[in-house]
Amino acid sequence: DAKTTQPPSMDCAEGRAANLPCNHSTISGNEYVYWYRQIHSQGPQYIIHGLKNNETNEMASLIITEDRKSSTLILPHATLRDTAVYYCIANPNFGNEKLTFGTGTRLTIIP
Amino acid sequence: NAGVTQTPKFQVLKTGQSMTLQCAQDMNHNSMYWYRQDPGMGLRLIYYSASEGTTDKGEVPNGYNVSRLNKREFSLRLESAAPSQTSVYFCASKGTLGLPSYNEQFFGPGTRLTVL
């Protein structure tokens, strides 16, 4: 699996958009970009994933650059409940079902 | 629909003791996983099971054994616990190819294990 690089921490004001970057410069053609988050000491929670097109669901948007070497997770209107550690993971969608978690970005939403 | 459940929630062991962590899912998922998370670290895969009757090693399998008892249950056993195995253990399951949940791993609440 390709290595991903994320900033260790970020702050965002409540109600504003939180933009979390991720670099994955060695990503291969069959690897998807997955985002999970972990609130306090709970089990991680899936957010979104994508291959090369931008994706949006009820939780977030995922913007992947055209060269696929980086991506940004966007939480459009951050709330205090979005305070968590966010993990960006590059993983093939078929054949290899193992997720490799790094240390992620600790996002703090400020009232 | 309870999702992924784990027992116990907390456990304290002495060095050399053995124990089994239990995990069950009620979503009819084929794949199940065991991860550990040390303080300030991301999750690391211990073992996984792609289907009933199969298991494979992950990144950190030493000191652990697993059993995929049936499609619902996947247990993790520590035969002789060591202080280095003090960690939070998470079980997860993943949906079947063709279902909307195929791309998503569902995690349990974790077992907090301390080995003295």
Image (spheres, coloured by chain):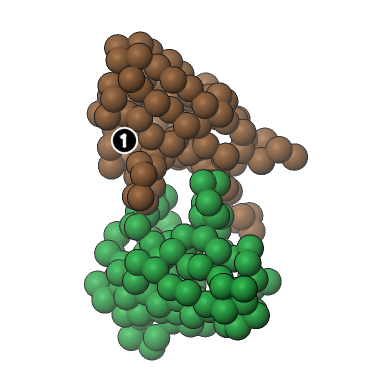
Q: Residue B113: x percent and y percent?
A: 43, 28
Q: Residue A33: x percent and y percent?
A: 42, 69
Residue placed most toward the observer, A85 or B7? A85
Number of marks in the image?
1
Quadrant in which the C terminus of chain A appears: bottom right
Furthest-front residue in this view: A111
Q: Residue A43: x percent and y percent?
A: 53, 46
Q: Residue at x 27, y 64 (%)?
A: A3
Judging from the image, what is the letter of the chain drawn in brown? B
Toward which corner of the image does residue B83 lie, by quadrant? Answer: top left
Disc 1 crowd, CA 10 A, few/some/many (<14, 14-19, 20+): some
Q: Is residue B93 visible?
A: no
Toward which corner of the image does residue A14 lie, by quadrant? Answer: bottom right
Name the tint of chain A in the rendering: green
Q: Residue at x 63, y 67 (%)?
A: A80
Quadrant in which the N terminus of chain A appears: bottom left
Q: Secondary structure at mark 1?
A: strand
Toward which corner of the image does residue B26 lie, by quadrant? Answer: top right
- Judge whether B32 appears above or below A86 on screen: above
Furthest-top residue in this view: B17
Residue A95 is left or right of residue B8, and the answer is left
Q: Chain of mark 1?
A: B
- Judge whether B79 appears above or below B29 on screen: above
Residue placed most toward the observer, A63 or B11? B11
Q: Residue at x 35, y 50 (%)?
A: B40
- Judge whether B71 appears above or below A69 on screen: above
Residue type, label 1: Lys
Q: Residue B105: x percent and y percent?
A: 53, 50
- Residue at the spot of label 1: B57
Furthest-right residue in this view: B1
Q: Is residue B86 visible?
A: yes
Q: Residue at x 39, y 86 (%)?
A: A65
